[in-house]
Image (cartoon, rainbow, N blue to C red):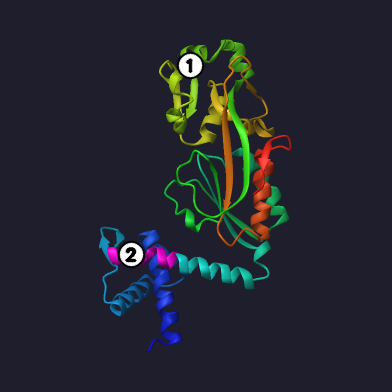
Amino acid sequence: MITIKNKIILLKELLYLKEIIKAGQFQIVAQKNGIKASNLSALINQLESSVNQKLIKKSSNKVVPTQAALDIYDDIKEINMILRRIINKFDKDIGVSGTVSLWSVGGLTGTNVLKMIADFYAKYPSIKLNISTNIEEDLTNIDLVLVYDRFAQIPSGKKILSLTQHMHFYSTQEYLDKHGEPKDIYDLFENYDLCLMKNLLTWKELEPYMKKVKHLHTVSDIMIVILNIINAGGGISLLPDWCTKECNSHLVKLKKVKFSIPLNVHLICRDGYENQIRILELAKLVKEAYFSDKDNERSE
């Protein structure tokens, strides 16, 4: 007979196994949870004995899950999510304290959000923000994910905000005064310095013009890098219109280049978290950072 005590022990071992698979090292998980790595290793050995399966293999400085561990990994993640939802229902203070994790693609959490974080901390000093753009991040463990609809790995969850803007070509007036303004998009691609986000190179709207590009001197998968180069007078780039707000207000849109691409941005919340005050307040921060009242926006 499996007792409650045995179930609690099994649950603890499974949750540790999940974290070890995610981190790839015993030491990282041990430090995070305040236990010795040797004790953590003993817990996993005990789990392996209980299920009569090898779950972890050591490979150089990392640990690698066996197929048996991978077969139950999604089930453990689901158990972890259920536990989080239960905790949220009973913890009355969780709305205005704790940690909120925010992940974005391609540098969407750029200068606008960073500029407003000080105000957010002033209002909610007990909230800690974890902001990541790591493309290898496990998005199932992220509270809020900020993506545009062309990003392939849109996670499951509650879509709490959807906003639409357009991308246009921008530069500084100093650069245009020095080099002149492009007559049209063909003139732009043939005769001017271009700085582009890496993912734009494969977008079908740009395909006809990419064949004519002669001065593509910077490509990056981080938007803040492109913004800094353009702000410094380094050329012209295709940017979302929110880039011209406040901290980049000196950027000017190319008037003669009649070209735009719609950009749909979604803010997705982890299931069960959409009514937390801290989540709603961070969503408001994102909205204020990128989108003015005149922007086309849709709240889900």
Q: Is residue 264 above or below residue 80?
A: above
Q: Amino acid at mark 1?
A: Phe
Residue 100 or 186: which is nearer the viewer? 186
Q: How many other residues sit within 10 Å of disc 2, few (<14), some (14-19) or many (≥20)?
A: few
Pointer 2 with pointer 1, Cβ within 8 A: no
Q: Report which residue position mark 1 lands on.
A: 189
Q: Report which residue position mark 2 lands on.
A: 71
Percent across and percent down for residue 200 are 47, 30
Q: Could you tell me which residue is drawn at 29 percent across and 58 percent down?
A: 61
In the rendered structure, which disc, 2 or 1, sits on the residue that comes first in sequence? 2
The numbered dot on residue 134 is none
Q: Could you tell me which residue is drawn at 39 percent across and 59 percent down?
A: 23
Question: Closer to the observer: label 2 or label 1?
Answer: 2
Q: Could you tell me which residue is drawn at 64 percent across and 18 percent down?
A: 173
Question: SS for tag 1?
Answer: helix
Give the residues drawn in magenta, as a range: 66-77
